[in-house]
Amino acid sequence: MKPKYKRILLKLSGEGLMGNKPFGICGEEVLRLCEQIKQIHDLNVEVCLVIGGGNIFRGAKEAASGMDRSMADQVGMLATVMNALFLQDCLLKLGVDTRVMSGLQIPEVCEPYVYQKAVRHLKKGRVLIFAAGTGCPYFTTDTGAALRASEMNCEAIFKATQVDGVYDSDPRSNDKAKRFDEVSYDEVVEKNLKIMDISAVVLAKESKIKIIVFKQQDEGSLLNAVCGKGLFTVVK
Ligand code: GTP
């Protein structure tokens, strides 16, 4: 297997950590994901990681039901820090040197995000997990992922989802939904294809970073997608 990319950012959904649980973190699922990350790290791919927090708390949803949006988003950002620490612990146990850098200053828990240090960690072959999104409310972890991918000069954002690419409608409810092999950033925005939020797609476009949408659950799907094999959609 030969990777097509030297440096990538992997965007995982928080829900993807739940396994079969209705909430929280499933240890076996975290291990399965970390083994996939180790596979590409072993091929010398430099890996940045951003994880959502929806398995613990969803800021926008809570705000919709009456909670102050800024405070709800702060709780959501803290949820991503918890997920990041779980992933770090698991990756370290697999022998993968991993650092967590947070957009919120919590120095007792993890390193604060410092651009120059982040670059240094990547050059040293460490997996780098960016926690707490952008550190600001009103931005999703998708936008945080596009921002960090831009700063770190990643060649692609690998967006892990429940389905194996971008479809013209939801393939889980419409069995005639059509999957795209390739789609442009503009089409994603114009057709509101909802693979990432619009600000993330626009930033990826401006930074000329491809978005590769693949299925998180499938065995070996990350390794395959990084090597250009299997099913996925490229947004470019
Ligand atoms: P280089 O190898 O030269 O890049 O330095 P280093 O990163 O090994 O040294 P550093 O002192 O930065 O980190 C040593 C350990 O302390 C690592 O496990 C870091 O994750 C941890 N560490 C560094 N800064 C912080 C911080 O602000 N908060 C927390 N919680 N840990 C930190």
Image: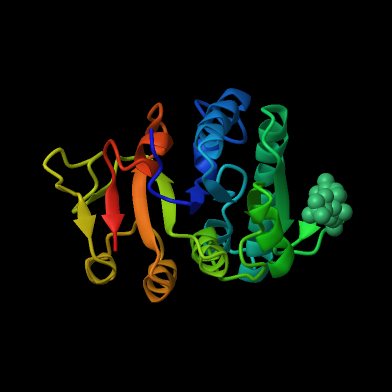
Q: Is residue 166 left or right of residue 226?
A: left
Picture quadrant of residue 162? top left
Q: Is residue 169 left or right of residue 6?
A: left
Horizontal and vertical percent for residue 140? 53, 63
Vertical arrangement, residue 89 with respect to residue 71, above or below: above
Task: Please say whether residue 25 is visible from this viewpoint.
Answer: yes
Q: Quadrant of the N terminus?
A: top left
Residue drawn at x 38%, y 47% is 4
Number of marks drawn: 0
Q: Is residue 152 left or right of residue 214?
A: right
Vertical arrangement, residue 161 with respect to residue 135, above or below: above
Horizontal and vertical percent for residue 151? 57, 69
Q: Nearer the viewer, residue 142 or 174?
A: 142
Residue drawn at x 38%, y 30% is 218
Q: Nearer the viewer, residue 3 or 11?
A: 3
Q: Quadrant of the C terminus?
A: bottom left
How are the colours assigned in the image? rainbow
Horizontal and vertical percent for residue 63? 57, 63
The residue sitting at the left extreme is 176
Residue drawn at x 22%, y 67% is 187
Vertical arrangement, residue 97 with respect to residue 193, above or below: above
Residue drawn at x 66%, y 27% is 94
Task: Please say whether residue 110 is visible from this viewpoint.
Answer: no
The residue sitting at the right extreme is 108
Horizontal and vertical percent for residue 8? 49, 53
The residue sitting at the bottom extreme is 206
